[in-house]
Amino acid sequence: MSLGGGAARRRWFGSAAIAFLALTVTLVGAPAMAVTLPPAGTSTAIAQAVAKSTSIQRLTSTVARKVFNAPNDNPAVDYPKTKNGCLTLTACVFGDKVSSKVIVVLGDSHAQMWIPTLNRIGVTKQMRVIILFMARCPAATLDVWLTAYNKAYTACSSTRSGWITAIDSLHPVTVLLTDHTNGVTSAASMGTQQFTAPQWQAGMQTTITDLQPSNAKIAIIGDTNTFNLSPPQCLAAYPHKVQTCSVPNPNPLRPSLASAEQAAAKAAAVLYVNPTKWLCTSTTCAPVIGSFIVYYDTFHLTCSYAAYLSGVMQTALKRVL
């Protein structure tokens, strides 16, 4: 049983609400512990693990021990200088930090999410990796509504514009664009409407056009599916019913605009990397793949799993590195 349907969600909340609340308090109060990142997985090992992920019903003892620290398996803990954003070209530098060959990663918290992956690629390829990200501020040129403060996110638009100017002057080898696309609302609607696929595509194409003076090779790393509930919390409540925490691929309750990103990449003739095959079968996204808890919240990969994907990501990005 997956939590993708309405009846399933009602049964989940009816039977486990008290346990879920208690576990949430425990997880939030757990000390932040950095993890030891695993070696990169091979494409074959990843494909096999993903194929088997939907048949996992019970947490093994190895995975069960990871549940309570999984929310801390995130870049704010492993790379604390990125906790409050990376707003300048010198604030968050990874990979080969002295290399003259530069990769710039531009986006919202998904740019931060991919640090374990791209840091390794930078070291391997002897390239400096510069992260530019502001929470909830997409790389796509869009005027966003900041729901938490009930106002237009003007700092996002102005900061993004400054970033693009700085990148154009830097002339990096590669620019990677990556965003979370579900639930982002427009300033024009005062937060009442999410961006449509045509709007997102146009915003991404504008960013790509504005980056042309940089002469960089550009690629989009596509969005990942969003879970309905935080996988670590759900797994803590259902260690013997792991698939209760799965969602459909794609998830109709938390739809992404990945197709709009892919269309933008095609229209602009730039590379599009679709990470979904490393995370989901053709029908289902499970919260556990092999011995990994894949997400630390509803839409961010754990550092452990992101690091595990470094090899396949490097292969996917080969033409722009």
Image (spheres, rainbow, N blue to C red):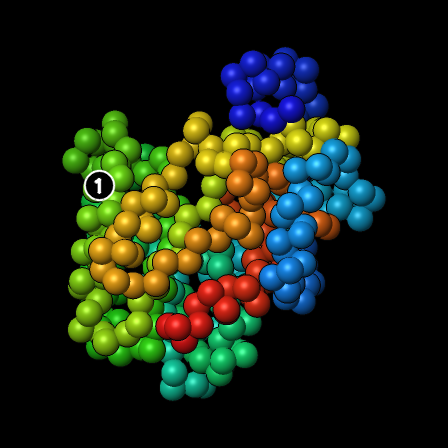
Is residue 66 positioned above or below 266 on the image? above
> Residue 235: horizontal and vertical position, in percent?
68, 34
Q: Nearer the viewer, residue 40 or 33?
A: 40
- Residue at position x 62%, y 14% from top? 11
> Residue 79: horizontal and vertical position, in percent?
54, 63
Residue 223 as seen in the image, left or right of residue 155: right
Image quadrant assignment for residue 182:
top left
Q: Which residue sits furthest right? A: 61
Image quadrant assignment for residue 12:
top right
In what quadrant of the picture does the C terminus appear?
bottom left
Is residue 231 positioned above or below 48 on the image? above
Q: Is any atom of residue 71 visible in this view?
A: yes
Residue 307 as seen in the image, left or right of residue 176: right
Q: Nearer the viewer, residue 285 or 230?
A: 285
Q: Is any atom of residue 145 visible in this view?
A: no
How many numbered markers are drawn? 1
Q: Tell me which amino acid carries mark 1.
A: Pro
Residue 307 as seen in the image, left or right of residue 263: right
- Residue at position x 60%, y 61% from top? 43
Residue 213 as seen in the image, left or right of residue 86: left
> Residue 247: horizontal and vertical position, in percent?
55, 32
Q: Which of 73 and 256 is in front in this view?
A: 256
Is residue 63 positioned above or below 130 on the image? above
- Which residue is tagged 1? 198
- Residue at position x 30%, y 45% from top? 260
- Residue at position x 59%, y 18% from top? 8
Image quadrant assignment for residue 268:
bottom left
> Residue 294: horizontal and vertical position, in percent?
61, 47
In what quadrant of the picture does the N terminus appear?
top right
Local secondary structure at mark 1: helix
Q: Residues within 10 Å of mark 1 (few under 14, many from 20)?
A: some
Q: Which of 117 and 274 is in front in this view?
A: 274
